[in-house]
Structure formats: C-alpha cells, structure tokens
Amino acid sequence: MIERRMKLIKDCSIDDKISVAELSVKYHVSQVTIRNDLRILQKDGLVRRIHGGASSNSDEFIVNRLNINYETKMQIAERAAQIVNSGETIIIESGSTNALLAKKLGETKDVTIITNSCFIANYVRDIPNINIILLGGNYQADSEVCVGPLTRQGLQSFYVDKLFIGTDGFSDENGFTCVNLLRAEVVSAMAKRSVSSIVLTDSSKFSQRGVASQLSLSEVNTVITDDKIPDSARSALERNGILVITVPLK
C-alpha cells in the first residue's frame, strides 16, 4: 500500500491530470481504493484531488515540495525518528524532511516539538501525540517560518538534547549553508540551545551551496542522508567527528 502511494505521487508529478480509472487499471485495485489513496495523499499535501482524478500541486509553498524525492525524504525521516525517545522535547527547524519527521514521531511516540515553522505546526495539528511550541517572530510567507530577534529570544527559554535541521547546501571547508540569512541565524541560535545538532538532507544538497553560513562542521554531531552522498563530503564530515547515517536510495 505504501509503495503504491509513493508511485501515485510520481504519477501525479509527471502528468498534469491523471484519472482514477487509469490509476485503478494500472495498479490492479478498485477505484474506491485509489480514491482512498488520493484522499490520504492530499491530506498530507502531496497531491491535489480534482474531479475524476488528481494532479500534482504546482505552487512554490513548502507543502508542494514534499513530493520532491518523497521516498528518500521519508526514509531519512523514519531513520531520524528512531533516535528520538517517547516523552522527549526536541527542536525541529523548517523543511519538508523535518515535516515528515514530525509527522512520523506523532504516529509512534509522545513528543514535544519546539519549532519556528508554522507549516510544521499546521502539518501535524491533528496528531494528538504531539505537543507543539511555536516560536514567534517575523513571518516569512514563502517558507512559512518565523525568524528574527523575537524568534531567537524565544529560544532562550529552552535547552534540549536534540536539534533537527534541514539545509540548502554544503561546503567541505565551511560546513552547511542556507539560502536565507535570517533563517541561518535562527539555526545558529537553535544549535546553542541543544546538546546535539542533527542535519537531515538528501544527498543532492551536498552538490549545492547557499549564500549564508548555517552551521560549521564543528557544530554538527550527526548527518542523516541517503547513500549517494559524495565521498568527499562523507570524508569531510567523518574527519570532523560527525556521525554519518545513510539510508538506501531506491
């Protein structure tokens, strides 16, 4: 069932519109089953249901980026969830993989999540096992996060064992980078309020660079990514004592 839904996400991203009848024939299941699959995927923000079928979400909000490399991101999120204990309080920064992590935790454990991501708070709003503490600040509509001095000030009330962040790029010399300076500043402040900083990213980000320094290699404890991480990046991480955990890229 999970494999079929992942294939449905890919189908909808390829075709502008695909019908329930076509999908029913393709996957040898009833139209009722396909409609149920699409209903669940739409609830998770991964497809858009239309009359008689479905299509991919097309705008630029983070909810519509969930379906990019979805299977890999889900594997990374599931692996990250394994290192969180029930009853724990953690900080989760913004990003699609982090959103999937929050949802996975809510399905399996009782956790408190401190976040600056309005998207993540909304994404898991119907999951009773999650207690969300949403940090305020200046709202950035494109990424649906709060940033700025008020966000950093709010972090001063907390100290946790684990921080989970996403990233926009990487440099062997300088570490992890971000495309937005204000978001990078919040990540730096979060790292100071946690014992362990854990980066969740697919391997494609190791071939990109952002414009703002996010975390140096000395500030990162663990990276969870897929097994296509470049050898040079893995070597740089491990030379700096960073634990690299990989999941198989399918």
Image (tube, grey):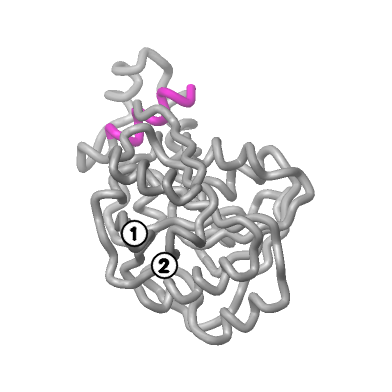
Task: Categorize mark 2 by other alpha carbons within 10 Å: few (<14), some (14-19), many (20+).
Answer: many
In the image, is residue 110 above or below residue 24?
below
Query: Within the magenta stretch, is there residue 6?
Result: yes
Foreground pick, 26 / 134: 134
Q: Amino acid at mark 2?
A: Gln
In the image, is residue 79 above or below residue 154?
above
Q: Residue furthest top?
A: 28
Q: Position of residue 48 (x, y in %)?
A: 36, 47
Q: Position of residue 71 (x, y in %)?
A: 40, 34
Q: Quadrant of the C terminus?
A: top left
In the displayed structure, does residue 130 sit left or right of residue 148?
Answer: right
- Pointers 2 and 1 in contact (C-beta within 8 Å): yes
Foreground pick, 41 / 80: 80
Dot 2 or dot 1, earlier in sequence: 1
**Residue pictured at 70% horizontal, 61% vertical:** 160
For numbered disc 2, what is the local secondary structure?
strand
- Specify the label residue 168 is tagged with: 1
Q: Which residues are magenta?
A: 1-11
In the displayed structure, does residue 31 sit left or right of residue 116?
Answer: left
**Residue pictured at 33% horizontal, 39% vertical:** 229
* Foreground label between 2 and 1: 2
Dot 2 corresponds to which residue? Answer: 214
Q: Residue furthest left?
A: 15
Task: Categorize mark 1 by other alpha carbons within 10 Å: few (<14), some (14-19), many (20+).
Answer: many
**Residue pictured at 36% horizontal, 42% vertical:** 235
Most frequent secondary structure within the magenta stretch: helix
Query: Within the magenta stretch, is there residue 101?
Result: no
